[in-house]
Amino acid sequence: MAKPTQADAERAVRTLIEWAGDDPDREGLIDTPARVVRSYRELFSGYGSDPREYLQRTFAEVGGYDELVVLKDIRVVSFCEHHMLPVTGRAHVGYLPANRVVGISKLARVVHGFARRLQIQEKLTAEIAGAIQDILQPQGVGVVIEAEHNCMTLRGVNTTGSKLTTSSLLGVMRDDPRTREEFLSLVRGG
């Protein structure tokens, strides 16, 4: 399937403006189609990259470190694939290294790479955990995402402030109760 051009996308935005009942040629809206397309290019930038590539460069010199690595409060900005409305929240990512670690910014880049697509939160959570497990091959991985879905808070049931929490626990994070509890305690702030 050929990707539509920028002009095609701008025409679609013009159509939506007209459908909503406004005039896309009025002063305040004349540049809106181009602005929307530019913003979508950024908001959906995850389609232009493979987030797994961020995990390729690792470090084996860890000075004997063999405990959990947890990066908390990674900002998540995604879009509900059912309504194309924002999903915003926080991801908490942890892993128990086997023999190598990755730069911490790479964990955030993996989250952003998968989030910047049309998504459901459950799939997003599993994709992040699966990529870390497949590439780093740690003893275990844990991912928890807490997010507000505008498809619920701005429309439909209008449940402002409600958040969905999803988790994916792999390896010892799933199988060893002590490791699982340590990870979840760190995520909760303990």
Image (cartoon, rainbow, N blue to C red):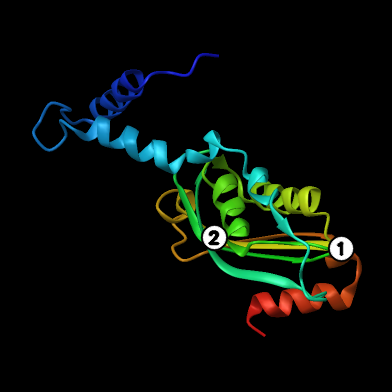
Q: Position of residue 95 (x, y in %)?
A: 76, 65
Q: Position of residue 130 (x, y in %)?
A: 76, 49
The answer to whether 11 appears left or right of 69 in the picture is left
Q: Position of residue 180 (x, y in %)?
A: 82, 72
Query: Relative to residue 39, is residue 57 depicted above or below?
Result: below
Label total for image: 2
Task: Tell me the crowding category of disc 1: few under 14, some 14 to 19, or many 20 or more residues within 10 angstroms, Cα based.
Answer: some
Which image quarter: residue 50? top right
Give the residue displayed 50% in from the left and 14% down from the top.
2
Q: Can residue 81 be seen by looking at this rendering?
A: no
Query: Relative to residue 63, is residue 174 depicted above or below?
Result: above
Q: Nearer the viewer, residue 31 or 148?
A: 31
Q: Nearer the viewer, residue 80 or 77?
A: 77
Give the residue displayed 8% in from the left and 34% down from the top.
27
Mark 2 — residue?
147
Check disc 1 and report its element: helix, strand or loop: loop
In this view, the residue farthest toward the top is 2
Q: Nearer the viewer, residue 100 or 86?
A: 100
Q: Which mark is residue 139?
A: 1
Q: Quadrant of the C terminus?
A: bottom right
The amino acid at mark 2 is: Ala
Q: Quadrant of the N terminus?
A: top right
Query: Relative to residue 167, is residue 19 depicted above or below?
Result: above
The amino acid at mark 1 is: Gln
Give the residue displayed 69% in from the left and 52% down from the top.
57
Q: Can residue 116 be seen by looking at this rendering?
A: yes
